[in-house]
Image (tube, rainbow, N blue to C red):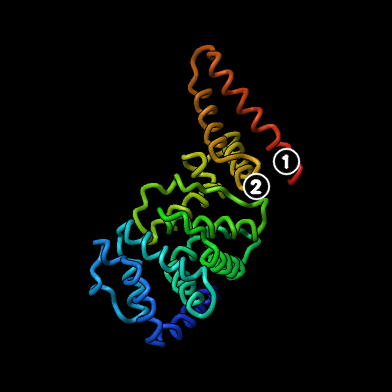
Amino acid sequence: MGTTHRVFVGLDVEWALVCADVANGALVRGWIEEAGVAEAGVAEAGDLPLELRELVAYLGARRDAEFSDRWLITLLDRAAGEGQEAQLAARVIVQAMVPGMVRLTQSLLTSRRDFDDVAQVVVGCLYVVARTFPLRRRAKVAANVMLETLHHATRELGADEAREVRLDDLWDVAAYDGNVADRVAQGLLIERSQAQQVADTAELDGAEGELVALLAWGVDHGSLALEQARSVVGVVREEAERTGAATPAARKRRSRAVRWLRPVAAQWVHAA
């Protein structure tokens, strides 16, 4: 990692010290075996590495939803306790989620935010989630952990900049292999409104370019929902392609788009 990723470099250094204690690998492996993860038929007990670093890499590499949910719940259950074992369980979860945390950090950056400042918030929030995760949520555990971390982080960074990413958006993610974080990050980047992504078009000039900039600003500042922005783009294209009189339904869509844009435009002018 680059020099600007000091938080994650520090995590890697700390992780090396955790892994240097061979007892930690045996302890975590024992938890997984004790929980019956191997007996569920999703992995063989003999396949589980003894060394902690290799064990966590193995767990994260398995693209099996049931396996992912089982081992994560096992560690989250341990992390909810007290003492050094709970701290170890939480630390393993954090390390397994490092690739996701890097992506979430990048997605939450703005021109006013330093990478390491955001990363520190994201890592701290993941620790909180690891220790307080509701264990009744035993499906799509990795996705839920990532989303809980995201929600904690956006509130910590500023409620006015929070973005909602739903678990439904991640329905086809089988297990944690970085894909969960990629999906969340992609949703965040869109909701942070890169103008071309909102408009789904190339660079625009004139009135169209100004509209895209307005939509991008509105979504980025929480004044306009992403779906509303997309709907407005659809209305504009529909109007541009119209050859006859507008239907009642089209007039209704146009009126709704104007109603959405009016307060956004006023805020934009005020902020200029």
Left or right of 26 on screen, residue 89: right
Residue in view at x 64 percent, y 32 percent: 260
Give the quadrant of residue 254: top right
Identify the element where label 2 is drawn: loop
If you read the primary sequence from the N terminus, does the residue marked by circle 1 or circle 2 appear first?
2
- From the image, tell me which residue sits under label 1: 267
Q: Which mark is residue 221?
A: 2
Viewer-proximal residue among 190 and 163: 163
Viewer-proximal residue among 259 and 41: 41
x then y, percent, for residue 224: 62, 39
* C-alpha gap between disc 1 and disc 2: 10 Å
Q: Which mark is residue 101?
A: none
Determine whether label 1 and label 2 are within 8 Å by CB.
yes
Viewer-proximal residue among 89 and 190: 89
Q: Residues within 10 Å of mark 1 (few under 14, many from 20)?
A: some
Residue in view at x 49 percent, y 49 percent: 187
Residue in view at x 73 percent, y 41 percent: 267
